[in-house]
Each structure stands twice: as C-alpha cells, then as structure tokens.
Image (cartoon, grey):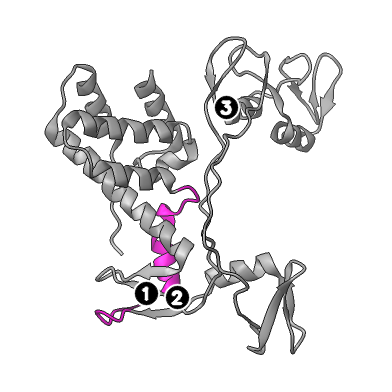
Amino acid sequence: MDWSPRVKPIKIRRLYRYARLGIYDDLLLHDVGWELYARCTDIATVADVYREGHVPCPECSTKIARRIDPLFSTGEGGTHENWFHCPHCAKRLLWRDCRQALRDIPRCFDCRAVLHKEIVLRCACGKTWSQEAYNQSVRTRVLLPCPHCLNLVRRPDPPARERTVSMRKSSPTLQCPKCQAVALHQHGNIECTVCGYKRRWRDYRKSLKKKDEKLECSSCGYTFRWQAWRKSARPLRTGNPRPAREFVKKWLTCRTPQQRMIQIDRLLQTLHGRGPLAPLFIDSGEHNIRQMLDDLAS
C-alpha cells in the first residue's frame, strides 16, 4: 500500500521563519498542511485496523474484515507524559528528561554528585550501586534531580482522563487452536472445554494478531496477505493516534492562512510534548526533531 511520506523538517523551519515575520506563504502552508493531513490520515487508518479489524484494500481502499478475529480492543492508547516546570528554577521539563540526564551522567540520589564508574557506581559520600540496581532506581523513583538545577522534583501526576462509555464485545466465542472446539477465557488463560488445551491469554492474543491470512477484496478482487500489509504499515503504528485524528478533523475546517498555521502549530506543540510520537510525522531522527521543536517553541 502506498503510504504518504513524512514531512521534511526544512519545510517546517521555513514556514515558521516566515510566520515570525508575519508572512503566511500560501504555497508553503498548502504543502506542509496537506502533507501533515495525508500522514495523519494514514496513521488514523492504521490505528482503525488494529482497533476494529477491518483492513483497507491496497488497490481500492475497500475495508475487508479479517476472518481471524484478534479480539480487537475499542480502547485507544495515549501517553501520560506532559510538560511541567521545576519548582526551583522554573525550567520546563519532561519527566523522561530527568531520567535521561541520570542515564547520561549518573549522579548520587542523595548528594547529586557525579558517580565514579568502577566495577560498581560509587559516590564520594560512600553510596554504591550496581549498574542494574541504579537503572532500576532511575525507572521507579518518583523524586529525581532536575537536569538544570539538580534540585529534587516530583514526578507529575498523569492528567485526568474523561470517562467514556464504549460498546465492547461481550464474551466473544473462542475457538480452540488445537481441536477447533469451543474454548473459554478464564483465570487469565484460554482453556479448551474438550481437549484441555491451555495457554496464557496474553500470548494467545499476540499470536492472533501476528497470524497470517490471505485477504481478498470483494470490490476489485485484489488479494494480499495480512502480514505483508502489517509490515508495510509498521512505520505508521502508534498506540496514541489521537493527535492525528484531531488534526484531520480540524484541518478541513480551516478557511484562512492564519487558521491553517494555528492548526499546524497545535499539532507540532502536541508532538513536542510526546517526543517518541514525532518521528512518525517528521522525516528525521528523534534527537534532531526534538532540537527543531525546541527551537520552534522558544
């Protein structure tokens, strides 16, 4: 399937350079905006496949239902990572910035001095850690030093989520992979009522999502394999397609260059706060994209 390419960073930088001068280049806005729109549409399409189980035909885009039902979830993932400010130096931070700073330059959690790397990590104050124990501590602590002023900051609470009521499949009929008889989902396993087959539910779901099958479009007759489609869509796969969906919805309502610029800026601000998501949209490495988004936000 022909997916839309990622947007070139040079176009985004040029667009912002003009906008800061009060110039809205219609051609550049058109290119960047519609390229982002096409990319967002593809990301939302791929998310729908994993959510609903209907695969678009690569030739005519007709949706084809998979015969192997992978028990798709109606839920949509997201990230709890958001900007917050250090209460001591007022610098804007992401919690992963605090973690990454300690991975780059290990410091004592008590006195914040740089640790000496020997067989173990050793501090002048007498504290020692093995590398494994230190990494585990960085992952699990709720108080870490600010990368800028080294004062302790607390991990921010995740944003409150609105409760939504969604229709979910209730008690789907399961088929034993071994004898094709009726199986039950119980005690965290799938268990066959006839042959006694038993497997962890999580492993069973993973195997269904990866299992190959031949799909045929009823409209144009085109045939393709699920695994081939899945491989082609891998660069568009994300557990948080919400920013892409919102951009697709709002972009079509824009009527003026200023409105288009606002929507592009809102999307990039959202990607700025969710670092791992940005490379799905922008054609560069994560470090370079982060640097560009930092520059645009300053």
Residue at 19 percent across and 16 percent down: it is: 21
The image shows residue 199, relative to residue 83, as above or below, that is below
Counting from the top left corner in percent of width and height, residue 37 is at: 27, 46
The image shows residue 160, relative to residue 241, as above or below, that is above
- Residue 292, by quadrant, is top left
Q: Quick one: quadrant of the C terminus?
A: top left
Give the side of residue 127 with respect to residue 98, left or right: right
Of callouts 2 and 3, the N-terminal one: 2
Q: Does the magenta portion include 164?
A: no
Residue depth check, mark 1 versus mark 3: number of the one nearer the observer: 1
Q: Find the distance from the CA under tag 1 to the CA under tag 3.
A: 42 Å
The image shows residue 55, relative to residue 42, as above or below, that is below
Counting from the top left corner in percent of width and height, residue 257 is at: 17, 31
Counting from the top left corner in percent of width and height, residue 286 is at: 45, 37
Q: Which mark is residue 66?
A: 2
Question: Residues in magenta?
Answer: 217-240
Give the side of residue 49 with respect to residue 218, left or right: right
Residue in the foreground of this view, choosing between 174 and 235: 174
Residue type, label 3: Asp
Residue type, label 2: Arg
Q: Which residue is mark 1?
A: 64
Q: Residues within 10 Å of mark 1 (few under 14, many from 20)?
A: some
Residue type, label 1: Ile
Q: Which residue is mark 3?
A: 97
